[in-house]
Image (cartoon, helix red, strand yellow):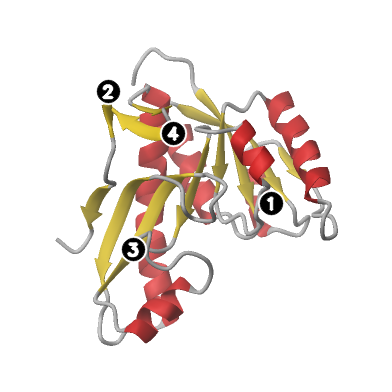
């Protein structure tokens, strides 16, 4: 590990928080130079909040307001992130759409993971859509967040083969297993100063990343 101070993460979740737990575990084990400073959910009943507390991580539940009032959540979330000293915002199964104003205010400091090989299959129900289309490969993408839904520059993708007997559930489980590997890896690159945001593009090791890196998990 480098001599850099640990990169402080603010993780937003909506459900079980399995990616959050994978990230927290790698932070705790010293495998990436980061620390989860706070976990925030818009759902007080989210199982991931309990998991985070079991890891000794501070949590906040901030209710999602009604239509047209997204700013109320974002204002409260921003205050909690600032209080925790979060330097990088990590969306890990956060199922709400943040406003363009919030995203632009944190340009280059928000990451997301999406369960498809973007730009294919943005949005929901990716596994179902992949199976319906008869795709032979599937995977996940870690990308910087921009105002376009699932449209920010990708950094790292995992790829798996779609098996003849796959269902939504089996495909989801195998893709998620790769997410737990590639998401902490990208966060580690940020913590090491290897991955940076310049001129609205990701730069890795001093070079603009025109295409995402790809790791084939069935190789």
Q: Identify the mark nearer the N-term, 2 or 1.
A: 1
Horizontal arrangement in the rendering, residue 217 relative to residue 130 (left or right): left
N-terminal of the two: label 4 or label 3? 3
Dot 4 crowding, Cα within 10 Å, few <14, some 14–19, many 20+ = few
Mark 1 crowd level (few <14, some 14–19, many ≥20, 10 Å Cα): some
Q: Can the viewer see residue 174?
A: yes
Direction from residue 157 to residue 73 in the image, left or right: right
Nearer the camera: disc 4 or disc 2: 4
Residue, far front: 199
Which mark, residue 50? Answer: 1
Image disc number at residue 206: 2
Please tell me which of labels 2 and 3 falls first in the chain: 3
Disc sitting over residue 137 in the figure: none
- Please state which of residues 32 and 194 is positioned toward the viewer in this rendering: 194
The N terminus, quarter of image? top left
Which residue is disc 4 drawn over? 200
Residue at left 65%, top 23%? Answer: 85
| Crowd around label 3: few <14 · some 14–19 · many ≥20 (10 Å) | many
Q: CA distance from mark 2 to mark 1?
A: 39 Å
Q: CA distance from mark 4 to mark 2?
A: 14 Å
Image location of residue 219, percent across then percent down = 14, 61
Q: Earlier in the sequence, mark 4 or mark 2?
A: 4
Q: Is there a contact, CB below 8 Å, between mark 4 and mark 2? A: no
Contact, mark 4 vs mark 1 (Cβ under 8 Å): no
Q: Establish if 172 lies above or below 131.
A: above
Point out the frontmost of discs 3 and 1: 3
The span from disc 4 to disc 1 (Cα, nearest Å) is 36 Å
- Is residue 32 in view from this perspective? no
* Vertical comparison of 133 with 24: above or below: below
Per the image, the residue denoted by label 3 is 139
Residue 175 is situated, as x and y percent measured from the top left of the image, at 37, 64
Residue 173 position within the rendered picture, expressed as x and y whole percent measured from the top left: 41, 69
């Amino acid at each position: 590990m480098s001599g850099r101070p640990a990169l402080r993460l603010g993780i937003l979740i909506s459900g079980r928080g399995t990616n959050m737990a994978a990230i927290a575990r790698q932070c705790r084990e010293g495998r990436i130079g980061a620390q989860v400073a706070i976990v925030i959910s818009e759902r007080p009943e989210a199982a991931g909040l309990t998991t985070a507390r079991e890891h000794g991580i501070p949590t906040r539940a901030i209710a999602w307001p009604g239509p047209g009032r997204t700013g109320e959540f974002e204002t409260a979330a921003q205050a909690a992130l600032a209080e925790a000293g979060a330097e990088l915002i990590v969306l890990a199964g956060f199922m709400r759409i943040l406003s363009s104003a919030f995203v632009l205010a944190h340009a280059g400091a928000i990451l997301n993971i999406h369960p498809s090989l973007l730009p294919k299959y943005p949005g929901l129900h990716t596994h179902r859509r992949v199976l319906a289309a008869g795709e032979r490969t599937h995977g996940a993408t870690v990308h910087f967040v921009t105002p376009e839904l699932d449209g920010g520059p990708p950094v790292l993708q995992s790829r798996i083969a779609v098996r003849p007997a796959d269902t939504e559930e089996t495909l989801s489980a195998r893709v998620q297993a790769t997410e737990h590997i590639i998401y902490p890896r990208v966060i580690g690159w940020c913590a090491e100063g290897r991955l940076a945001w310049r001129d609205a593009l990701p730069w890795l090791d001093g070079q603009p990343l025109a295409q995402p890196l790809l790791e084939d998990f069935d190789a």
